[in-house]
Image (tube, rainbow, N blue to C red):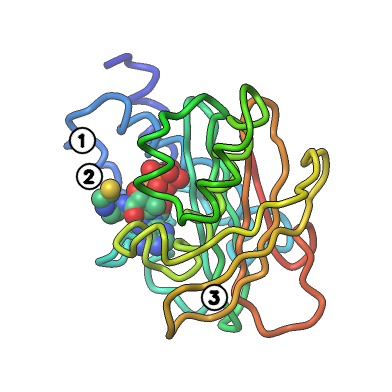
Amino acid sequence: MLPSLIDSAARILYPSELEKWRQMAVAKRRDEWLHGRWTAKRLLTAPGMPWEGVPFTALAIENAPEGAPYVRGAQSAGCLSITHSRGMAACAFLPGEAGTVGIDLEWVEPREEVFIRDFFTANEAELALSLEGEARDLLVTLIWNAKEAVLKAWQKGLRLDSRAIEIVAEGVGRGEDWEQLKYQARVEGFPHCRLFWRREGVFVLTLAAAFSGDELTAGSIIQLKTD
Ligand SMILES: CC(C)(COP(=O)(O)OP(=O)(O)OC[C@H]1O[C@@H](n2cnc3c(N)ncnc32)[C@H](O)[C@@H]1OP(=O)(O)O)[C@@H](O)C(=O)NCCC(=O)NCCS
């Protein structure tokens, strides 16, 4: 372990987080986890945010039993979501108690047909398999990414079947700016989310928010930080 990484962890993490980080056996997981905490703390302590000016080491981000992250002692301040992938991290924060948010980042790359058949609904698979090359890679990544964002906004993650959500991806654009995406829930008991996506270099970034207000856009109520 590089001394510089140990130094930066000590400047970023709350004592209990530092302890947890030190016990992580897999270097990739340790790096991604630290990157996610750092990105989230930069967002939460930024001007206008609930923890403006609070030192990173005074803020503990914990995970609920099913994995959703929250700021220790402050669950009612808002909903936090974190994603990390291949050297990139992103987080979103929806202030207050009005709703929940989920964010997911995925590297665009080819995925096997068996992945599509196992994890996608019949309609999603039919659309994906009708495409080839980069168009298929992008669509498959987007569908998977969007499912994970909704599953995170539902605070469940992959504890629910990925086919519980059907992404309606016909006619999606190029994702050069935030675009809204539709989906259909195939399970009951979870709130409806507004879903947005965009390209972020070689990644796809998707944001889902279960929120009862009218004025939600990806760039407004949700605070977002990518790194
Ligand atoms: C949550 C999950 C969808 C994340 O997917 P991923 O693309 O691999 O990883 P990401 O970097 O995008 O997201 C990880 C973050 O999601 C958040 N998260 C985890 N479980 C969550 C949940 N139930 N609800 C909301 N957010 C959750 C955490 O903040 C986590 O980061 P952290 O551990 O550093 O705090 C998925 O890993 C999962 O549900 N795992 C738990 C269940 C499981 O392992 N099932 C078997 C898989 S086939």
Q: Is residue 212 above or below residue 70?
A: below
Q: Which residue is mark 3?
A: 77
Is disc 3's CB within 8 Å of ligand 1? no
| Residue 154 percent coordinates (x, y) | 46, 71
User: Crowding near pointer 2: few (<14 within 10 Å), some, many (20+)?
Assistant: few
Picture quarter with the C terminus: top right
* Secondary structure type for disc 2: helix
Q: Which residue is mark 2?
A: 20
Q: Which residue is mark 1?
A: 24
Q: Is residue 149 left or right of residue 50?
A: left
Q: Is residue 224 above or below residue 8?
A: below
Inspect the image, locate mark 1, and give the three-letter code of the amino acid beneath it. Met
Picture quarter with the N terminus: top left
Residue at 41% of width from left, 29% of height from top?
A: 112
Pointers 2 and 3 in contact (CB under 8 A)? Answer: no
In this orientation, which residue lies closer to the viewer: 70 or 113?
113
Q: Earlier in the sequence, mark 2 or mark 3?
A: 2
Residue at 54% of width from left, 56% of height from top?
A: 123
Pointers 2 and 1 in contact (CB under 8 A)? Answer: yes
| Residue 226 percent coordinates (x, y) | 64, 40
Q: Earlier in the sequence, mark 3 or mark 1?
A: 1
Pointers 3 and 1 in contact (CB under 8 A)? Answer: no
